[in-house]
Amino acid sequence: MLAQLSSIAMQYIDASMVGRLGADDSAAIGLVSTSLWLFWGICSAMTSGYSVQVAHKVGASDGKGARNVFRQGIVASLIFSFAIALLGIAIAWRLPYWLGGEEEICATASLYFVVFVAALPLLTLNYLAGGMLRCAGNMKVPSMISGLMCVLDCLFNFLLIFPSHTYGFGGVVVTVPGAGLGVLGAALGTVGAEAVCAALMMWYACCRQPEIRLAGNPGSWRLSRPVTRQAVDISVPMTVEHAVICGAQIAITMIVAPLGVIAIAANAFAVTAESLCYMPGYGIGDAATALTGQSHGAARWELVRRFGYMAVGLGMAVMSVMGLLMYLFADEIMMLITPVKAISDLGAEVLRIEAWAEPMFAASIVAYGAFVGVGHTKLPAAMNFGSIWLVRVPLAWWLSHSMGLKGVWVAMCLELTFRGIIFLLRLFLSRWWSAPSVLSGETPSEFK
């Protein structure tokens, strides 16, 4: 949760600094943000195919096997992320036009997008190392490095976004240098912070973490068929699921784009503001993946089930409280992000709509994390896909015609509630915790 809260703080810093540049620059970033989530999420899901295997190996006390999976994860992540980065660069200059952006913001949006996709290999290594450490049971180091990333992001953004400033303190004049790069500076600042922290995360995972330490433990870096096949079994459903969900979010962006620059910016900033509620849920979901994964590797089926139930209950409680706080302080949250009153007012309205969905959103996030820990990804991926495409997108398109941006967020609220219900039904009415292991090919006796 601390790691996710650090990520939230970084998003708030980015949004607040960019918000000072004006509505057009804010809308340019908002226009391509969902497309960036698509590229980031695909790479993150790919790394999960290897980190989940490490959780199982650690649970089975197989250190050599865990290190073997880690090495192959590094090689596969670099190959995959370079390919995805090249694809992103190839479409960067046309993407804002495809999304329906207005001419005056498209060039800026393309520039912001291309900086991030070019840095995908570094970001993917950050995802991989963080996932490996968490699945090895180390939650502290990733959270500490995430906190550092927040500090670096603030510093780099301040120096790169704004021009030089002069401050006076008791007759002493101090000039703080600044590059004045605007939106480009926001992208470079965040990428720079990610790069520094990716290097630190990889160093700790490779040299210090006992269960997966590669330094002093030589081994082959060649991809092997069994590990790759198992990674594909786990990560492909997650990757496809994330792609189709982000595809739906891109479709939502296309629905919002004709509503104007204010609506685009308010939608993007409200999504950032809402992360205050749901990022703790993702933190608990990460913990659920590690705990159910290690218990599954140790063949402790009852413990898998109990961890799943406990994590989902905790996630729903925490996000319910966060949803209440978001409802009460929506205006103040939005004013922190943008000084443009029209944007902050509209953003606060939609945040209050979304606050009602947070408990059920938590159920879907954390239950999904528990399912991933046991390698159970296909059906949950299909559930996410069906919910967002068959409920959210049609409702958003229909309600946007009469309610504008508020209609889009009403649709989101209803869909997240529906998604939480079906995940709870799956959690309590199926024997997911004793499912056959996709990693070993064995069927637990109680499942038989």
Image (cartoon, rainbow, N blue to C red):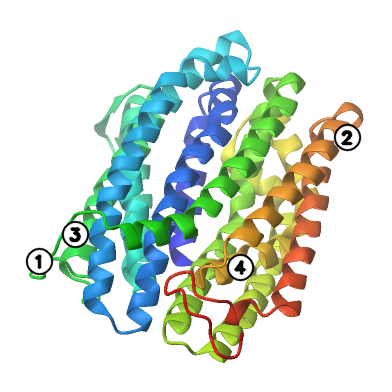
The residue to which callout 3 is attached is 203
Q: Please say whether residue 139 is visible from this viewpoint.
A: no
Image coordinates for residue 379, horizontal then vertical, percent: 65, 61
The residue to which callout 1 is attached is 218
Label 1 vs 2, first from the N-terminus: 1
Nearer to us in this view, 208 or 345: 208
Return the mark for residue 366.
4
- Would residue 252 appear left or right of 101 to someone viewing this image? right
Give the secondary structure at mark 1.
loop
Amino acid type assigned to the residue bearing label 1 in the image: Pro
Q: CA distance from mark 3 to mark 4?
A: 29 Å
The residue to which callout 2 is attached is 399
Which quadrant holds residue 86?
top left
Label 2 vs 3, first from the N-terminus: 3
Category of crowding for the residue at label 4, using alpha-carbon neighbours closer than 10 angstroms: few (below 14), some (14–19), many (at least 20): many
Label 1 vs 3, first from the N-terminus: 3
Image coordinates for residue 67, horizontal then vertical, percent: 23, 68
Label 1 vs 4, first from the N-terminus: 1
Category of crowding for the residue at label 3, using alpha-carbon neighbours closer than 10 angstroms: few (below 14), some (14–19), many (at least 20): some
- 87 vs 5: above or below: above
Give the secondary structure at mark 4.
helix
